[in-house]
Amino acid sequence: MNTMSKQNEPITILLTGSVIQNHPGILSTGIQNSWERLSDYLCAIPLWLAEPEIEHVIYCDAGGFKIPEEIFESPKFESLELDLKEICRKRGKGTGEAMSMEYAMQHSRLLGKNFFKCTGRLFVKNFSEILQTMTPIQPYFYLCKDHKVQWGDTRFYWMNRDCYEESLQPFLDRMNDFEGRIAEFIYYYHAQEYRQLPQPVYIGRSGHTGQIYAEYFSDEVHANAVRLMKKLNPSL
């Protein structure tokens, strides 16, 4: 048993995303097609559900798309959605993600006081190894910060709600991708109660650029995503 498993609260991960692309500044190489975007989410979610240390997986969609909970046939999964398309078009994906997290914290039946957050289209290959390094003994973040560029990695981190509400929540209204006040800078400067997270090894790709990170999903994982998509739409 690792140190995180010794806490009283179940290990939970909140996945954020948007099947419908809402960002007006997405690059031409980015993932625009909704079915293609959905495929990435349906690749990542089953990998998190299969992670033995994780007891709850919550996905919250900012574009109003509901992924049916029953398609995964898992009691570990919860699906939430809200429609932030207009807000994301005006203020960018950072605001959409922050508001998705707020919505999940208010409405999820599974989300506790401490949880991991990950971009929904990604899986962290070295999650188990990262878990072994963590000892949550007081309210803080586990976050990767790059001090050279003054940037916090918001793709994957661990957070305590009290710490979040005290150090980050007051600054979220200022977030605006198009005015240079991006989430990565806000997390770097204001998430001061933190421990440096070991570097995650990301499986998947960036929705904004289309760039594949350490590797892409295997053929087997992608075939399972296609099977799940046919559950949603048999004509595919």
Image: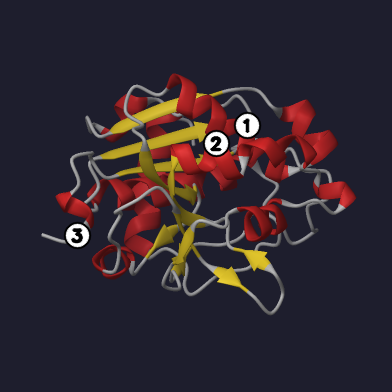
Looking at the image, which residue is at 24% across and 53% down? 51
Q: Tell me the residue that label 3 is attached to.
A: 3
Q: Quadrant of residue 87?
A: top right
Helix or strand or loop: what does disc 1 sit on? helix
Q: Tell me the residue that label 2 is attached to.
A: 165
**Circle 2 or circle 1, nearest the eye:** 2
**Residue closer to the observer: 219 or 26:** 26
Tell me which amino acid carries mark 3: Thr
In this view, 80 is above or below 9 = above
Tell me which amino acid carries mark 1: Met
Direction bottom: furthest residue: 148
Q: Tell me the residue that label 1 is attached to.
A: 99
Helix or strand or loop: what does disc 3 sit on? loop
Looking at the image, which residue is at 46% across and 56% down? 157
Classify residue 106 as left or right of residue 90.
left
Identify the coloring.
secondary structure
Classify residue 147 as left or right of residue 52.
right
Tell me how far mark 3 sits from mark 2, CA to CA.
25 Å
Tell me how far mark 1 sits from mark 3, CA to CA.
30 Å
Tell me how far mark 2 sits from mark 1, CA to CA.
13 Å
Q: Earlier in the sequence, mark 1 or mark 3?
A: 3
